[in-house]
Image: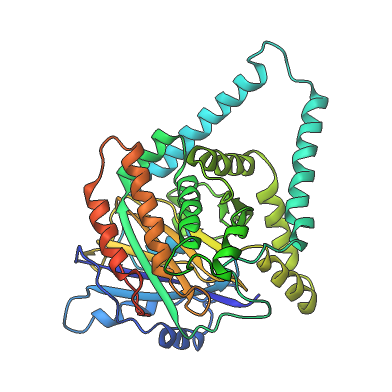
Amino acid sequence: FEWNHHLFECTLKSDTVESSEFEFEQELSRIQSLKPDTKRPSWQIHVLKNVISRGQCGTALNHVAFVLHVHHWIADGISLFELLLHDLADPIEKTNNVDTFRRTKSQQSRKGEKKHLFGSGKLVSFGSRIVHHATLFVRAYIDASIRLWIPDQRSPFALKAGAHLSGEKVVLSGARVDLPSLKSAARSAGLTIMETMLYTMTRAIQRYMRDDDLFPKGTKERASNEQRLKSTISLAIPFSFRQLSVNSLQSVKNDVAVPYVTLPVNRSESKQQQQSVRSQIQRFREGYTPRVVNFFMHILAFLPRTIRNILWWRACRRVSFVVSSLPPQNTQISIQGMPIESIQYWAPTSGNVGPSVSVFSYNNEFWMGMRTDKATVPQPRLFLYYMYDELSKFVDTYSEHGLVEYREAAQRLHRKARDDCVQPEYI
């Protein structure tokens, strides 16, 4: 597999994140010259130990930026964040609310499963279970193999045929919202955070492809977009099998799959869109698709390079977006005694795919990030604005209290959305 990168940026003492002076390509060149750390798995380059040197001479460190190089789609975002905590952060208390939450949810799901199986007072026959699981496995096999040969239809977010990301005009855009309010709204709507993001992306894509300034009515591009919105748009999301625990901070391994999800941009009603993404994620949890995808990804590594590249690029053509997410970390961490106020994380643009959307939550803040090539998506901040605006509408609708500051922040982002600037932008 080829190397890709994950970018983290940390602000240690300022509540407001300003545009970064971080030279992205220069930092990548420096990291490419480093040797892999033999204490880590062979697919990781360990560069964290060299990061803090900027702040050790005189003035206090108020901003850290660093890059991890990893293999395509193999490195789990959870692993990367654990690397950050284990190698950079000061010791933290050995408590993990997420682990307790996971165990509680697991117990609840098992109870719910028993009710489902035995609630009618009759045992579900063993043969019926075999047929049920066999059906799920065959469906997973089809999703992970046969459908690999059916590329996603052309969209404004997809690379042109035979094109590759140039890396010359890379845009990093980010926006943050209040995590407790978002979780409250998602809970009221009966969605998880990931399902909420997929729903938000669906609405944002519809608005972006119908933007009158970017795609004027009557043009060929607008007509093509309207036709494209009659079907779904595919993207890839991470699905981790790992259980978070304190002990996991001491060891890093990958147990993650990247299955495909279709965004229901062909539906106009919000309830229908929410139900569509909810049913897809539920199918992943109950079925075998993530594990079959994980199995095929491991097999791919042992194939001859020529065959591997053909299959890999074919897989990349299946999607227009790549989404990466990291779990909540509500314990504020520190580096050399300085508390980290916020952490931003951008997913790599993986393979022959245009934009990447990343989701990151830390210290009760929820970050959305987007990284793309301006040759592929000319107005990435406009798309991010639509995502942010749809998210604010979602919170206003389902949260216990509306958030006026969401609207104000969305207006600030909208003013920046059409600027021809390639530096990272945050609100």
Q: Position of residue 421 (x, y in %)?
A: 35, 80
From where the camera sits, is residue 86 visible? no
| Residue 71 shown left or right of residue 32 in the figure | right
The picture quadrant where one finds residue 159 is bottom right
In the image, residue 32 above or below residue 151: below
Residue farthest toward the front in the current orientation of the protein: 218
From where the camera sits, is residue 210 visible? yes
On-image quarter of the N terminus: bottom right
On-image quarter of the C terminus: bottom left
The picture quadrant where one finds residue 267 is top right
- Residue at 42% across, 68% down: 213
The picture quadrant where one finds residue 9 is bottom left
- Residue at 76% across, 70% down: 302
| Residue 311 shown left or right of residue 182 in the figure | right
Q: How many marks?
A: 0
Q: Position of residue 110 (x, y in %)?
A: 57, 28
Q: Considering depth in this image, is 100 or 142 the residue closer to the camera?
A: 142
Q: Considering depth in this image, is 271 or 367 the residue closer to the camera?
A: 271
- Residue at 32% across, 58% down: 176
Residue farthest toward the left in the current orientation of the protein: 59
Q: Position of residue 157 (x, y in %)?
A: 55, 68
Q: Position of residue 164 (x, y in %)?
A: 61, 80
Q: How is the image coloured?
A: rainbow
